Amino acid sequence: MLKHYSIAATFGISASASMKVEGFEATQNPYVPLQKSYVFRKDQLRDVLAFLGSPSGDGLYLTGPCGSGKTSLLEQVAARLQWGVHTVTGHGRLELNDLLGQYMLVDGGAMQWIDGPLTLAVRLGHVLLINEIDAVDPAELIGLNEIVEGKPLTIPQTGTVLMPHPKFRLVATGNSAGNGDQSGLYQGVLRQNFAFLDRFRLMEVGYPAPEDEMKLLAELVPNMPETVRESMIKVANQIRKIFIGGQDGGGMLSVTLSTRGLMRWASLVATFKSAPNALAYSLDRALTFRAEPAEREAIHRIAKDVFGDDWQV
């Protein structure tokens, strides 16, 4: 059953009380993402809701740097609208048949057809979310061209022809916009077929503004002093700036402190608060143990400069 939700009340943003968006009644649908604490950015929310409400034969492609919240944005919108999501992680060996389904032995008996994530989403009116779509072989993705436009889905193995549910949506995320990785930061990113990309509306998801990350950290670690949270966000943004680099390509770091990593760092500081230097100890475990020794030293130097005397606390 469909239901209309107040945008202001559902997403915690400033909006007219008359503005509503269509979703589903709350049920025990196992495909609805788990609702988590989330700070919605108004412009991004507007784009996602516009797509879900009226895709007009398009898919939605969310592009942006590592850990900027592309997947969580879609999932948290869907969670609040009770909209089922089938998530697939793209990779070089992913084939269209993996999305359609396969015959499998059921309870040791006869072979039975089991729907894949695409077929389920088409049947049930859910979202098919393909993460890291720019890592998939472009030749395989061409098979999705017609289904994006709302045309029937044919399953060759069974001969079944499915008309897409009116609420079926296709969403993709990628660190590039499908044109390959110009920065050298993301291994395995492939240039995608233009005809396939032309079926998507694009949306850029950057890192949240400092005030939005402050809200997230305040909810996550309410007992942490505000000045410490502010400094952690300053450190994160300096690391991101160096990681992303400029127009000539990637920066001087091979790792970055995403919003996800920032929240991990804050959680670990609370967990290891009795460590001699909880901030440095937790930063290693949240990020810098993945970095080269020189990069680790550089990141710690950035943090020390930002925190000043507090870095030894």
Image: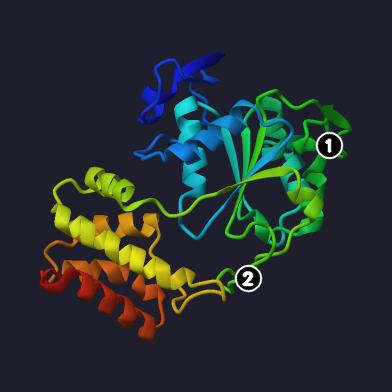
Image coords of residue 92 (percent x, y) = 70, 62
Q: Is residue 74 left or right of residue 258?
A: right
Label 2 belongs to which residue?
182
Where is residue 266 shown, x and y percent of the image?
25, 57
Tell me where residue 118 sits by quadrant. Answer: top right
Give me the disc on residue 155: 1
Q: Give the numbered dot on residue 143.
A: none
Name the quadrant of the N terminus.
Answer: top right
Q: Is residue 286 visible?
A: no
| Disc 2 to disc 1: CB gap under 8 Å | no
Badge 2: how crowded within 10 Å, few (<14), some, or many (20+)? few
Q: Position of residue 52 (x, y in %)?
A: 60, 30
Label 1, secondary structure: give it: strand
The quadrant in which residue 104 appears is top right
Label 2 to label 1: alpha-carbon separation: 36 Å
User: Which amino acid is tagged 2?
Assistant: Gln
Residue 287 shows in this picture: yes
Q: Which of the two residues, 44 or 132, is positioned nearer the viewer here?
A: 44
**Residue at image x 52%, y 25%?**
29
**Mark earlier in primary sequence (2, 1):** 1
Q: Is residue 281 above or below residue 130?
A: below
